[in-house]
Amino acid sequence: MTMIRSYLVLGALLALPGWAAAATPTTVQIQPLLDANGCSSCHERSERLVGPAFDDVAKKYGGNVGAATLLLKKVRNGGNGVWGQVEMPANTRISDADLARVVDWVLHGGAKAP
């Protein structure tokens, strides 16, 4: 499966309300992924560090049908200009499954819960 197709499949799964509500991981489950993959170096749950706070990302993209696919691509490929001029480096080490869990956690309010 190509990388783009993988993003589309993961994005479609994350967009399903019943699936996301049942499967959204908790902060306790996600924190080790954030730490191991360098996310915590630039992002916090509720306060901006180098990059935006996870709850600000949820506010900006929550409810957008294509948000999961967009964020999967942004994290995987990096980028800049949306939250300022500091470039977010590409994160190629996190697995597709773990990345999908992190994006799901951010978009479905997990970032706001313990």
Image: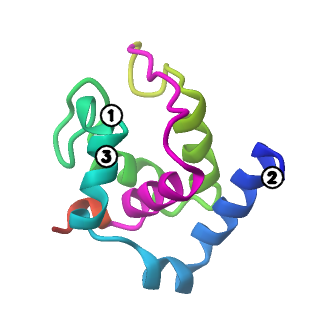
On the image, the x and y values in percent for residue 105 come to 38, 62
Is label 2 in a helix, a strand or a loop? helix
Q: Quadrant of residue 111?
A: bottom left
Mark number, residue 5: 2
Asked whether the residues under the numbered discs 2 and 3 touch, taking CB atoms below 8 Å apart as contact, a structural biologist would say no
> How far is mark 2 from mark 3, CA to CA?
24 Å
Q: Mark 1 points at which residue?
A: 38
Q: Which image quarter holds the C terminus? A: bottom left
Q: Which of 65 and 97 is in front in this view?
A: 97
On the image, the x and y values in percent for residue 86 come to 38, 14
Asked whether the residues under the numbered discs 1 and 3 touch, taking CB atoms below 8 Å apart as contact, a structural biologist would say no
Q: Is residue 65 magenta?
A: no
- Compared to residue 42, the image places residue 107 above or below, namely below
Name, please, the residue furthest toward the right.
1
Category of crowding for the residue at label 3, using alpha-carbon neighbours closer than 10 angstroms: few (below 14), some (14–19), many (at least 20): some
Q: Name the residue under label 3.
A: 34
Q: Which residue is drawn at 33% across and 37% down?
A: 39
Q: Which residue is drawn at 44% across and 16% down?
A: 87
Horizontal arrangement in the rendering, residue 29 relative to residue 79 (left or right): left
In primary-sequence order, the first of circles 1 and 2 is 2
